[in-house]
Amino acid sequence: MSVDLNASTYIHSKPALALNYILPAVVEVLHTNFEATDKTTVFDLGCGTGGAAAVLSDDGFEVAGVDPSKDGIAKANIAYPDLPLEIGSAYDDLADQYGSFDAVISLEVVEHVYDPKTFSTTMFDLVKPGGIAVVSTPYHGYWKNLALALTGRMDDHFMPLKDHGHIKFWSPDTLGALLLDTGFQSVEFQYVGRVSLLAKSMIAVAQKPN
């Protein structure tokens, strides 16, 4: 599959606004799963300009990551020169190139992916047996969709006129099915950004079998 490696343009190297409410929950998940483990390895699939990877590195995790945006990785390499953040995507054989990790995170990425099955398979291959994948994406559920429709915000939410915007709109059922079909097990969800019924994003935590 052909991928435009300059498909996204980033304007800063700090965590995006959405990560202000996503990252604390992700950090808590990682500490809960690996609190007794030294040198926990984390791969950031879709690392953007490196903001999330830098936060995790500062917190003691060993982090590597890729992103398909040349512009984003250039900014990440300038801002965080000690972090191994490189151009790459879920359509590459990343496990062959980088090996496997205790955890793989992918934050606000899967909604941009044309081939989610390949994305999920790549993520699965990157996770060590017994490790976890942590995936965040905008939440879509009945009550939130109803609220968007009633308040006339559906067009703004789905962003049809935005270049390189969201092309997949996930619910817990559909994202859970994707991860389970790939081979993950015990998929659990957290909801962040608002009360759960109207949450801005959801975070799926899926375990790879031993």
Image: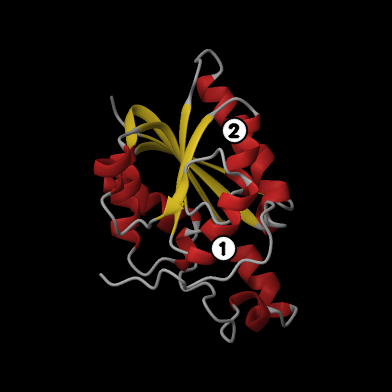
**What is the quadrant of the N terminus in the image?**
bottom left
In the image as oriented, which residue stretches furthest toward the top? Answer: 36
Q: Tell me: residue 62, above or below residue 123.
A: above
Q: Tell me: residue 19, above or below residue 132.
A: below
Tell me residue 19's x, y (percent).
Answer: 67, 51
In this rendering, position of residue 20 left or right of residue 51:
right
Tell me residue 138's x, y (percent).
Answer: 58, 60
In the image as oriented, which residue stretches furthest toward the bottom? Answer: 161
In this rendering, position of residue 16 left or right of residue 47:
right
Residue 44 visible in this rendered orientation of the protein: no
Q: Earlier in the sequence, mark 2 or mark 1?
A: 2
Instruction: Examine the image and state in which quarter residue 108 appears.
Output: bottom right
Name the residue that disc number 2 marks: 57
Q: Are the residues at dot 2 and dot 1 in contact (C-beta closer than 8 Å)?
A: no
Q: Tell me: residue 127, above or below residue 181.
A: above
Three-letter code, disc 2: Ser
How crowded is the residue under tag 1: few (<14 C-alpha within 10 Å), some, or many (20+)?
A: many
Instruction: Examine the image and state in which quarter residue 160 appears.
Output: bottom right
Three-letter code, disc 1: His
Tell me residue 46's x, y (percent).
Answer: 48, 54
- In the depicted view, which residue is nearer to us: 156 or 15? 15
Image point (62%, 70%), residue name: 145
Image point (31%, 47%), residue name: 94
Tell me residue 20's x, y (percent).
Answer: 73, 49
Residue 24 visible in this rendered orientation of the protein: yes
- In the depicted view, which residue is nearer to us: 183 or 68? 68
Q: Rounded to the nearest whole Å, what is the CA distance between mark 2 and mark 1?
A: 31 Å
Q: Coloring scheme of the render?
A: secondary structure
Name the residue that disc number 1 marks: 140
Q: What element carries label 2?
A: helix
**What is the quadrant of the C terminus in the image?**
top left
